[in-house]
Every structure is written in structure tokens, then in C-alpha cells.
Amino acid sequence: MKRRHLGLLAAALIAAPAFAQAQTVPVGAIEILSGPAAAYGIAIKAGMELALDEINQKGVLGGQKIALTVEDSAGNKDQAINAARKLIGRDKVVAIIGPTLSNEMFAVGPVTNERKIPTLGTSTTATGITDIGPYIFRTSLPESDVIPVTLAKAMTRGVKTIALMYANDDAFSKSGFDVMKAAAEKAGLNIVTIDSFGSKDTDFSAQLTKIKGLKPDAVGISALVEPVSGVLLQARQLGFGKETLFIGGNGSNSPKLGAIAGAAADGLIVGSPWFIGKTTDGNPAFVEAFRAKYKVDPDQFAAQAYDAMKIMAIAIDKAGAADPEKIATSLGKVQFSGVMGPFAFTDHRDPATAAGVVVLTMQDGKFTILQ
Amino acid sequence: MLAQQLVNGVLLGATYALFALGFTLMFGVLRVINLTYGFTFSAGAFIALALTRQVGLNIALALPLAALGSGLIAVLLDSLLLPRLRRRPSAELDSLMVTLGAVLALYSLMTAWLGPDIRRFPPGTISATAIELAGVRVTAAQGLILAASLLLVGLLMALMTTTKLGLAIRAVAEKPDAAGLMGINTPRIAHLVSLLSGALGGAGGVLIGLNFNAIQPYMGESMMLRGFVVIIVGGMGDMRGALIAGLALGIIEVLTAGYIDSSLKEMVAFAILVAVLWTRPQGLFGRAVGQRA
């Protein structure tokens, strides 16, 4: 009797995928679900699954459901490659979303590109991602698209001269500074001085006193949130007031800024691809649905993944068949408007517009949208 | 602008001097390079943070309690790590190695326990108002650090030169064996010096934490490098030398960043260290051993 049950179970197991295959479109995802960086992957998975709930109510390709398989990379390149091989070889996915980090994409991208499976990064911002090959796409905006929006906003407030400060011992801060400097030059701002400091420094008085003497309209800072907080606190001690606009890079886009710097951070502006308090593009409904499903607030990674899943569903639907080659072609042509704002790909499969970028300002220790 | 830069330099230098005081005292008397000193600095800041945040104590009460707490931690660490080493012929090198290992273990333990995040004292712990005079601004916290450094150096020097306890400490510094034979309780003096130096380190951590609002387990480590420059240039074990060298280092760093290039300020500081060690290994203000206190 036991044996008969086992036989039935085995038959069911063999039959189930075959039956499901006819009804669903298999899509894979590779995200960091364990380890120190798991928070990113978990947010992304949550965003994708929320979008999937909505997509599968109607389905794609005339009512077929998308079956999403999420594999854990644990932030490890080898594990990410194995996940890609498993998704393509065993699960026969027609497209892959992810992986989470740029350096994982540099490992996985060549594999999926060679197998001609369209691969869509939602959180990979490094330069050169889409150079991997014609099947590699991304929806995440690089820093070089965000900073010009912030500077343009500053210039509408009469900023003409700017001093730049950056942490010179940290790759993230230095590359953010390079982007900021290039964008300031391109925007026609007059850069009065460039000063650097160490990421672990606590004293910035010499640099700030020098900057104060030059009286720039704005001070742009590219550094992680801790030194940025230190700079702001000391700037207020030295008597910097509302006449100087502080502009942060990506590192300043963190709620920790208000926690450490307090009122000293008031008035700082920073550009962000997404913001929870954004009232346009169906964002409030997304935030509400996310809270209802997961009992936590969505973050930028969840929002990016939510849009990416929908973009992928449109591409599959428009492709007319669950075929990787056709999906890759139709993915490049998707026109979409989601919680991140209007979206389309460039010919090089990068985001074509930064129209969704919002400029935030710090007020009483919290970010709000700068009107 | 030059006036403000000089004031910035003096204030930064005062923080270096404040940090170096206890370090140089410990070295001058106990003849050991004790790197766990940096940990008492972090510990002092965290004790005061807990006392003001969780217990709600006034900073005027939290500061001495934090100093006492870190002094006791220093005594405990010393009695665990150092007595065996002090009797060895190369005590200075051995103590450097042992305390380096110990301090790194302590920092990681503290990070594992409390997390690497930067914390700050609750806003309003100390008045944020600044005094402005002829375009030069000084905040209350900065004034407090400067006053505390000068006061502590003065008090320590008075203790060493005018009291019987100071005489005993100096005797132990000069010839521990002879001091013991003369009836001085040398282990007790050693503990007292540890207590004093740990308390100085802890008080430094609180004051500097108040000024820079960057309290973090590794804060003592980043200060240690500057502390080394100050006590070497000032002459190891020389308190007045530490004060002068600390102020000089602060002023040089600020002037380099303000008028030459901010990315060169560390280079200048450490180039001075190398130059001093080359030409005057006993330090710029170094005097004969035994007169250092």
C-alpha cells in the first residue's frame, strides 16, 4: 500500500511540471536572499511577487500565468552562475531577472548572454553592465543620470557657484565625485574649489573655513552618510546658514543622515530614483498594497523590482510566444509608466530617461519631496 | 579667515593633546606601550552615551562617571595583560605586540555587541551656541575641550611636582626596584597610574564625542595614529611636550588643508614624525628619563 502511494506520488510529480508547462511561462530570478546583503534581495523578491499577483490576475499571452522561480545567490558570484545554469537548464526559463549586485551581473551576464536568455538587472548601477552583450538589459538608473537632475534643481534656485567635497579614500565616494564634477561642469556651474577628506575623519574645519571664505552658492558632497553628517554638523558650527545650499550624492540618500546630523542636515538636497512619499505614477497604490502584503514599507529596491517585473510581463505578452529570442526583441521596445516614472530602453538597453528622478530635501530629520 | 583657521587648528590640536595625555603618562611611568589605551577612549564615550541616553543623566555628571568607568577598565586590562611582561628585558616591544592584539579583539567585540553605526549624544546635551568675535566662531564644546586640556595638563603637572604621590610616581618611573626598596608600594602606584590614564582617555572620548558627534567603537583606533605622532614628537612620557606637540600638529594639519591641499594633511603630519625620529629620537621636547614628568 505504501508502495502504491509512492507510485501515485511519483506519477503526480512527473505529471505536474508537464501539466504546468502548458499553462505557465517560466521566468527565473537570481537574488541575494541570505547573508549580509540579503536585505536587498528580499526587498527585490517582495517587489517582484507583488507585481506578479497583479499580472497573473489577467495573465500574459492570452491568459497564461507567469511562474517565477527565485534562486538565492547569497551574494556569491559562483553560486549566482550555478543558479543561472539551473534556471536555464532545468527550469527552462524564458527570461531572467537579476542578479542583485553589479559584480554578480558581470559573472552571470556572460553565461546567460551566451545562452541567449534575456536578462534584466533591476539594481545594477555600475558602468559597463549592458556592454556584456545584446541579451543584457537593466532598468536601474546609474548615478550619472541622477546627479544632473539634482544640479538642475539647484540651479533653478539661483545656484551659480559650487564648492565640491569628497572622501578620497573610498571608491564609491570618488566615482560619485567624478560624476558630480563632470555634471557641474556640463551644467555650466562655476566650481570654486575642490576639497577632500578621509572617510573616517571627524574634523573638517579647515576645508569648511576655506569654503566659507569663498562664499559659494552651494556645496556638493560625495561621501558615505557618516562623513556627510560630520561635514554638516561642523558646517553649522562654523556658521554656514541657509544662504548655502548643501547638495548630497547617492551616499546622502539615507535616513541615517537625519538620525546623525539632526537639524544640521535641514535644507540639504539629494536626487533619488524613487521616494516612498511620491504621489504620482500610481506610487501611493503600490506603497499601500506593499504594506498590506508584507507589513513593512517598500524601499527603492522593491519599487525597482515591481516595475521590472511588469516590464518583463509586457515584453512576454508583446513577444507573442514564450520564446527567449522574441522576448529579447520585444523587451527593448517596451514603453512603460510605473512607480519609478516613465520608462523606455535606449538602443544600448539602458534606461532612456531620468524623468522619474525626484529631488528630496531634508526637513526636521526626514526627507520630503522638494517642490 | 587666517584667524579662524588658526583657531580651528588650536581646537583640533587640543583634541589630540587631550587624547595623548593619558597615553604618554602611562608610557612615561609604566614603561609600556599600551595600545588598549585607545579602547578606554571609545569606552568612555559609550559609557557617557549610555548614561545620558538611557539613564538620562546630565553630561556634567555623566562625564566624571564615564572617566571613572574607563579608568577601572584600564586597571582591569593592565592587571590581566601586563604584569608578566613588565619583568621581561624587552618590555616595551612585548607590550606593544600583546596590547595590539588585545585592543583589536576588544574593538571587534564592541562592534559585534553594539554595531558599527555612528551614534551621537542627544541634541542639546551641550549648548550648540557659538561665540563669534571678529569673525571667529568657537562653540561651547570646543571651548570645553580647550579648557579641559589645559586644566588637565596643569593639574597633572602639579600632581607630579608638588605632591608626595607625584614624587612616588616619579620614583617608580625612574627606578621601580629602588622605589620598592624605599617602601613605595610599586604595584599600587602602577594601578593608580593605569586608573589615571584610563580616566584621562575616557574623558577625552566623551569630550571629543561631544564635539564631533561621531561615537563609534573604532573611534579610539583612528585617534591612536595621531596620538602616536603627538607622544613621539613631544617626547614619550612628557606631558608638556604632548600638549605642545598636539597643538602644533593640529595647527599644521589645518593650515595644510586650508592653504595648500586638503589631501596632503596626513602626509605632512607623518612626514614630521619621520623627520623628528631621524633627527631627535628622544622627541622635540624630550628630556632625560626621570625628568619627564
Image (spheres, coloured by chain):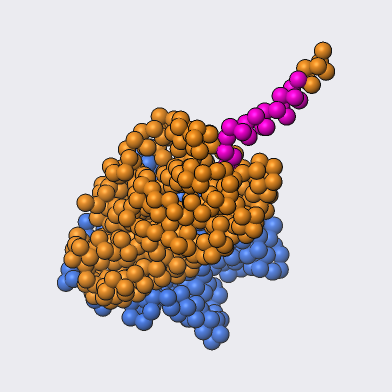
Residue A342, x across and y down, in percent = 35, 51
> Which residue: 45% across, 67% down?
A175
Residue B235, placed above or below residue A327? below
Residue B243, x across and y down, in percent = 41, 71
| B81 left or right, relative to B220 | right
- For residue A174, which quarter of the picture? bottom left
Q: Main secondary structure of the magenta part?
A: helix
> Which residue: 60% across, 52% down?
A117
Q: Quadrant of the N terminus of chain B?
A: bottom left
Count of numbered circles on the image: 0
Stretch of the chain drawn in magenta: A8-29
Assess whether residue B76 is covered by the magenta stretch: no
Of A156 and A283, which appears nearest the observer? Answer: A283
Of A156 and A26, which appears nearest the observer? Answer: A26
- For residue A220, which quarter of the picture? bottom left
> Which residue: 25% across, 60% down?
A153
Residue A267, x across and y down, in percent = 24, 55
Q: Residue furthest top?
A: A1
Q: Residue furthest bottom?
A: B279
**Residue B143 visible to an observer of this rendering:** no
Q: Colour of chain A?
A: orange
Assess whether residue A21 is covered by the magenta stretch: yes
> Which residue: 29% across, 54% down?
A359
**Residue B258 visible to an observer of this rendering:** yes
Q: Colour of chain B?
A: blue
Residue A66, placed above or below residue A358? above
Residue A43, placed above or below residue A111? above
